[in-house]
Each structure stands twice: as structure tokens, then as C-alpha cells.
């Protein structure tokens, strides 16, 4: 079971950050109106508000470099997942990457998953 969970989490994380880095508007497909994002402590509810928040972040270019990725099942009755990610964020080609952590709660939807909960934090030393 954990191999499947790790595979799903890996595919999701790769897709999410590749999409985020290329075009933040494309992330709308991964959220629903019941989805919630907590970004640096600020809560945002619903697809439109989440995408608006992500698109309005104050940088032009971003690259996520994932360092760790951990996944667990999050329900005994639904094939949902909790995915925790840490990594480095290179913003506008800065030579000093920022450390971040992000947690996703993924809920199955048809043959895919959507993000029900998304918690993002920069990690300051």
C-alpha cells in the first residue's frame, strides 16, 4: 500500500510544482470550492480565491526544489492522502533560496485527486 501512496504523492508533487513554476493559473484544476489554503497563516477558501492568492504573490519567476516528500493515508474509508513536502524556493533567480514546507490533504475525485487542504510556510533559520 505505501508504494502506491508514495507513487501517487510523487506524481502529484511533481505535477503541482511543475505547474506552479510554469503558470500558477493552471493550478485551478487541482482545487475545489471547498478547498482551503493557509499561506503564511492567512486562510483562503475556494478555487478562485486560492488561485488569486497564488497568482498575486510578489515574484515573476519561481522554482521549487523538493528536498523531502512524505505521504500517509488520511482516512480508513476513503483513499485520501496527507502529503508533507519540504524544499527550497528560488525566487526571481535569487542566489539565496528560501526554505519552505507545504502540506497537502488530497481527496480522490474520479480517477484523480484534488487538494482539499493546503498549508504553506516559509521556514526561517
Image (cartoon, rainbow, N blue to C red):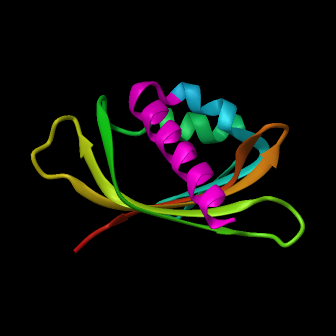
> Where is residue 23 shown, x and y percent of the image?
46, 25
> Where is residue 55 shown, x and y percent of the image?
48, 32
Q: Is residue 20 magenta?
A: yes
The stretch of residues the image draws in magenta is 1-24
Magenta part, dominant SS: helix
> Where is residue 53 shown, x and y percent of the image?
54, 40
Query: Where, quadrant-wise, is the C terminus in this rendering?
Result: bottom left
Give the left or right position of residue 72, taking residue 41 as reference: right
Residue 105 position (above or below residue 89): below
Q: Outermost residue, right direction?
A: 77
Q: Residue at coordinates 14% horizontally, 42% vertically from top-left? A: 94
Q: Residue at coordinates 69% horizontally, 61% vertically from top-left? A: 81
Q: Residue at coordinates 57% horizontally, 34% vertically from top-left? A: 52
Query: Where, quadrant-wise, is the N terminus in this rendering?
Result: bottom right
Give the left or right position of residue 81, taking residue 119 as reference: right
Q: Quadrant of residue 92?
A: top left
Q: Outermost residue, left direction?
A: 95
Out of 56 and 15, give the one closest to the viewer.
Answer: 15
Q: Quadrant of residue 91?
A: top left
Amino acid at each position: 500500500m505505501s508504494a502506491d501512496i508514495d507513487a501517487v504523492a510523487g506524481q502529484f508533487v511533481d505535477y503541482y510544482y511543475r505547474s506552479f513554476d510554469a503558470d500558477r493559473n493552471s493550478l485551478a484544476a487541482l482545487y475545489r470550492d471547498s478547498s482551503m489554503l493557509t499561506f503564511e497563516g492567512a486562510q483562503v477558501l475556494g478555487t478562485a480565491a486560492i488561485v488569486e492568492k497564488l497568482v498575486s504573490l510578489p515574484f515573476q519567476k519561481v522554482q521549487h526544489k523538493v528536498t523531502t516528500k512524505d505521504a500517509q493515508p488520511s482516512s480508513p474509508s476513503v483513499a485520501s492522502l496527507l502529503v508533507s513536502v519540504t524544499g527550497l524556493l528560488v525566487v526571481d533567480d535569487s542566489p539565496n533560496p528560501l526554505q519552505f514546507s507545504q502540506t497537502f490533504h488530497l481527496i480522490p475525485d474520479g480517477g484523480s485527486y484534488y487538494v482539499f487542504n493546503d498549508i504553506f510556510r516559509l521556514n526561517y533559520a
